[in-house]
Amino acid sequence: MDIKIQKLDFSDGELWPRKGIVGNNDFMKLLDFRSDTVTKPSPEMRAAMADAEVGDDVLERDPTLDRLERRVAELLGKEAALWTPTGCMANAIAMMLHLRRGDRFLASAQAHVLGSELGTAAWLAGGMPEALPWDGKPGRISAEQVRKAAGSSGPYYTLRTALLCLENTHNFAGGTCISLQDHRDLTLAAQEKKLAVHLDGARLWHAAAFLKVSPRDLAEGADTVSVCLSKGLGAPMGSLLVSNQDKIEEARRLRKMLGGGIRQGGIMAAAGLVALDYLPRISEDHAKASELSVGLRALGFTQETPETNILLVPVASVPNATKLLKDVGVLVTSVGSALRFITHRDIEAGEIKEALSRIRTHAEAILARPEV
Ligand SMILES: Cc1ncc(COP(=O)(O)O)c(C=O)c1O
């Protein structure tokens, strides 16, 4: 294939174009692997949003938000849930619930709460982060490490460690899962050391599908869990923090403090309820990542086999590779020296073959070390 996108097409009024112009009015659909957050609401979702029954959630609760919160609490086996616009806000509220100023919290190296939330754990919750190195496989931390890092109570001048933050799946480790056994060992270690546990489960659904367990099993032993409806499930926004009744009542106050009291939030909750219907199909996105991985191997790339929908592909030069791929309408981001491909519902199954055939045109150049 000898086509190169000459410019991106914004003519249909979208902020981010879906297609590139390849000459003579020919179009090439952009295959967007930058994130599973790039999905657009389906017509069914938009219809549900338009028809949503709403109230004023700050005054007396919104009935559709209430329905979504109950459904997600039930899915995760917890007493209550609180909707937030974003995963970052749900995590920030959890940190504010669990930490007092100067408390230390433990998290796996490269966890989203450590490096990708602009320091909210410190800024809003006063927490001191301690990154635990990966142990055994990317993203994994062991219960022994948690015990060691938590230390033991000492004299009054001992730093207090108050919280263990888990992330399942682990985004920057390449969507790797914490197995059910590891999850149980980790929460047990935390309990022994009197640490609260917050689980950043932005993609907990993906972990549950890969491990063939229920999200509820993977939430057990965590005091708070955040989950997202905008990552892979197709909602335009929305996360939930789940916990016991008392913590969620306090979380509601904290959400208001952060400016997150959304009046007719039912419009967004309606999208969230439709998004949950995608849960049984989430493995389809994992299959797309596997197919992409197998195809890339055949082209000479060497990467770990993906467990879920995130694929990290080491390349010689990230800026060079990203540009070459963009020229053929394949959009990716990067983590360190690897390209990050995330598969999702808006990448059709047949489009993986198309992506591979476009990547093939530049595979050699992407794999070659750039001249210096
Ligand atoms: C693991 C993880 N946690 C939290 C978030 C934050 O979610 P949001 O972008 O909705 O704030 C993300 C976003 O990609 C994520 O990957």
Image: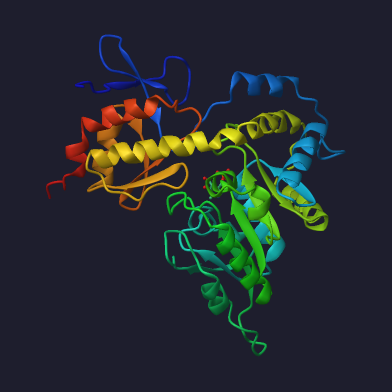
| Residue sitting at x 75%, y 31% | 266
Q: Quadrant of the N terminus?
A: top left
The one nearer the camera, 125 or 351, is 351
Q: Position of residue 225 (x, y in %)?
A: 66, 53
Check the image and name the residue furthest to the front.
212
Check the image and name the residue furthest to the bottom.
155
Q: Residue 330 falls in which quadrant of the image?
A: top left
The one nearer the camera, 120 or 54, is 54
Residue 62 falls left or right of residue 120? right
Check the image and name the residue furthest to the top.
24
- Picture colour scheme: rainbow
| Residue sitting at x 46%, y 41% | 309
Residue 256 falls left or right of residue 371? right
Could you tell me if residue 102 is visible in this image? no
Relative vertical location of residue 98 with respect to residue 77 in this rendering, above or below: below
Relative vertical location of residue 164 with respect to residue 38 in this rendering, above or below: below
Q: Position of residue 325 (x, y in %)?
A: 28, 33
The one nearer the camera, 306 or 86, is 306
- Tally of numbered discs: 0
Relative vertical location of residue 259 with respect to residue 139 in this rendering, above or below: above
| Residue sitting at x 41%, y 39% | 289
Could you tell me if residue 214 is visible in this image? yes
Q: Position of residue 98 (x, y in %)?
A: 69, 64
